[in-house]
Image: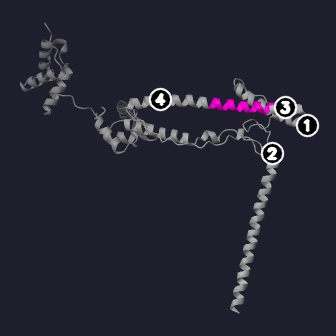
Amino acid sequence: MSIFVPNKVYLRGILLHYFIQKKSAAEAHRILVQTYGDNALSDTTCRDWFRRFKNNDFELEDKERSGAPKKFQDKELEQLLDEDPSQTLSELGKILQVDESTVSKRLKGLGMIQKQGHWVPYELKPRDVERRFGTCELLLQRQKRKGFLRESLPTRDSSIGDCLPSFLPSLVRKDEYKPRAKLANSSLSINMVQAYAGVTLIKKGAVGGEGGDEDDKEKEEEAERERQEAIREAEERRKEKHRKMEEEREKMRQEIRDKYNIKKREEVQEMPQEEPNPLMRKKKTPEELAAEAEAEEEDEFTKLRNTIETQVNEIKSQIESKCSLQ
């Protein structure tokens, strides 16, 4: 047999019944103890409720205390954020008449976080994901058309034919340069440095009067072949690395497309203009340089002659016009 356990509201209703029957608080408490035992209300509680009944307060539910936090609906908070997502916790608390900690807990429950002074959902909406994905694709297409990495490749100084690459330290002597530990694992980088250093040392020996020897020419040609081979290996490695990276990126992009049901944008195939590699550029001979200088001088002389002829013709036309007037 189950035992009935009365709640507070039920017992308060019994007290109101005894109050209407003109019984005292002590009598009502005694009857409750005889009937419900330990579940009965205390004597002090019975007296407090009889006092409220005498003041014509017959509400049996507990009244909201002044210090208790006010309850509010999440819809009110969401409406305020839709109107102005840049509101602070203090401003939201004043509008809702609650403490800042209460607002913070509700925002966390709604999955809202603050970024750059605005409350935004932690999980991106599908349209936001699609917009970010489209921006990434546009940036990748621009990189394919004209990559900024090509402009950052090291080049040789055109005025000095046998200098080391520009990315090497300028304060280290060429014959004493040692690759860093980071470059030690790359045989390609070491070969490039050795090739450049070898060409430089050969040129230094040529200044001392041994430039006409066949051995020096053979060494120079061998060093040049090594340099060209190192450049070709570097280019092949760069292309292979770029291909693998592009495959990984395309795989990630396809996963995002499948997740959010995004259609792949059709790319317009453009023929990129390949820029000549400055490292593969052939050095000009003294005869070619002299021919270019003569051509420039001839162009300047032709311009000067044309200018003088124009001025002479203008003077002649002015003199003829004056003579005709006289």
Asked if residue 180 lies left or right of residue 74, the reply is right
Marked residue nearer the N-terminal end (4 or 1): 1
| Viewer-closest of 56 and 215 | 215
Question: Dividing the image into 4 quarters, which one contains the N terminus?
Answer: top left
SS class, disc 3: helix
Q: Earlier in the sequence, mark 4 or mark 2?
A: 4
Q: Amino acid at mark 3?
A: Glu
The magenta region covers 222-238
* Most distant residue in the right direction: 209
Circle 1: residue type: Gly
* Tag 2: amino acid: Thr
Q: CA distance from mark 4 to mark 1?
A: 60 Å
Tell which of 326 and 141 is nearer to you: 326
N-terminal of the two: label 3 or label 2? Answer: 3
Magenta stretch, overall SS: helix
Q: Residues within 10 Å of mark 2 (few under 14, many from 20)?
A: few
Is 223 magenta? The answer is: yes
Q: Secondary structure at mark 1?
A: loop
Residue drawn at (80%, 50%), measured in percent from left and top?
289
Image position of 298 (left or right of 246): right
The residue singled out by tag 4 in the image is 252
What is the number of the mark on residue 218? 3
Residue beneath label 1, please?
Answer: 212
Q: CA distance from mark 2 to mark 1?
A: 17 Å
